[in-house]
């Protein structure tokens, strides 16, 4: 379907901006390799990570179908990436052959948007917590549920985790150290374990 959709492929180095939605909100990107983050900047320059992206993840599928542009949302390359870009006009308009593949693509895209909305609601659950400790525990529990295990690999470094939960990095590290001392969480670099995860899960 690449000729039908006029797919464009590009490579990026760590630290580069892959896509700025303030300049163009009409493209959908598919991350083929590497790692990236969907980042929002507020008027004060505070950086918030909205989503982490890995191979086969999409970005822009929701904004592509909106009417307006945003001047504070972009995708940043965290580890060398290759990306496929599709224009949403080529997706929504039927190709000359009206092929079944094109219809299936639209169906899959709608399913992905639905799943992403679920993840965003989970993110809201994390941010709605009042304290840094509550935010960390909510984030870790969601990651444990996704991994179906009390032990999992954190998809962030410490700075990115602080951005993700919207907390000061130093304050977050102090709270995380207290949580380790109290036995609420085990941490070794990016390896996390929640000792009480299985117990609480069994009571649900």
Image (tube, rainbow, N blue to C red):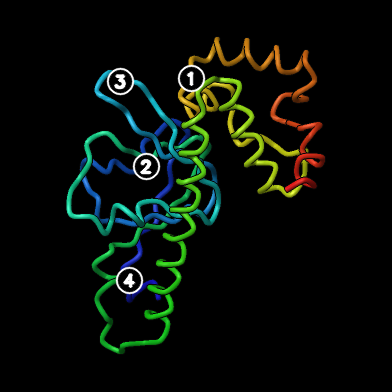
Position of 97 with respect to 67 (left or right) is right
Of label 4 and label 3, which has the lower sequence position?
Answer: 4
Q: Nearer the viewer, mark 2 or mark 3?
A: 3
Question: What separation in Å lies between label 2 and label 3 (alpha carbons)?
Answer: 19 Å
Q: Nearer the viewer, mark 3 or mark 1?
A: 1
Q: Are marks 2 and 1 in contact (CB under 8 Å)?
A: no
Question: At 41% from the left edge and 36% from the top edge, which residue is drawn?
Answer: 76
Position of 160 with respect to 102 (left or right) is right
Using a 10 Å C-alpha cutoff, classify the residue at mark 3 as few (fewer than 14 neighbours), some (14 to 19) or many (20 or more).
few
Question: At 51% from the left edge and 44% from the top edge, which residue is drawn?
Answer: 122
Secondary structure at numbered mark 3: loop
Q: Nearer the viewer, mark 4 or mark 3?
A: 3
| Residue 167: mark in rendering | 1
Along the viewing direction, whichever of 146 and 7 lies nearer the viewer: 146
Instruction: Please provide percent x and percent y for residue 111.
Output: 46, 66
- Number of marks in the image? 4
Secondary structure at numbered mark 4: helix
Of label 4 and label 1, which has the lower sequence position?
Answer: 4
Q: Are marks 2 and 4 in contact (CB under 8 Å)?
A: no
Question: At 61% from the left edge and 36% from the top edge, which residue is drawn?
Answer: 155
Residue 183 vs 23, above or below: the answer is above
Q: Which residue is mark 3?
A: 45
| Residue 18: mark in rendering | 2
Q: Nearer the viewer, mark 2 or mark 1?
A: 1
Question: What separation in Å lies between label 4 and label 3 (alpha carbons)?
Answer: 36 Å
Residue 23 vs 128, above or below: the answer is below
Of label 2 and label 1, which has the lower sequence position?
Answer: 2
Q: Which residue is mark 4?
A: 5
């Amino acid at each position: 379907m690449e000729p039908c959709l006029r797919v464009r492929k590009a490579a990026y180095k760590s630290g580069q901006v892959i896509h700025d939605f303030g300049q163009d909100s009409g493209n959908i990107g598919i991350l083929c390799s590497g790692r990236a983050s969907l980042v929002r900047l507020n008027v004060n320059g505070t950086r918030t990570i909205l989503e982490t992206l890995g191979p086969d993840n999409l970005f822009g599928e929701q904004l592509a179908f909106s009417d307006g542009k945003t001047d504070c949302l972009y995708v940043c390359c965290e580890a060398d990436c290759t990306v496929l870009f599709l224009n949403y006009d080529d997706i929504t308009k039927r190709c000359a052959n009206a092929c079944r593949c094109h219809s299936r693509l639209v169906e899959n895209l709608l399913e992905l948007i639905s799943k992403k909305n679920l993840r965003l609601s989970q993110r809201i659950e994390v941010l709605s917590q009042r304290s840094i400790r509550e935010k960390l525990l909510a984030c870790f529990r969601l990651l444990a549920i996704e991994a179906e295990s009390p032990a999992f690999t954190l998809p962030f470094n410490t700075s990115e985790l602080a951005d993700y939960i919207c907390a000061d990095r130093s304050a977050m590290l102090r709270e995380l150290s207290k949580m380790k001392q109290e036995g609420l969480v085990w941490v070794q670099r990016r390896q996390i374990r929640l000792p009480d995860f299985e117990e609480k899960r069994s009571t649900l």
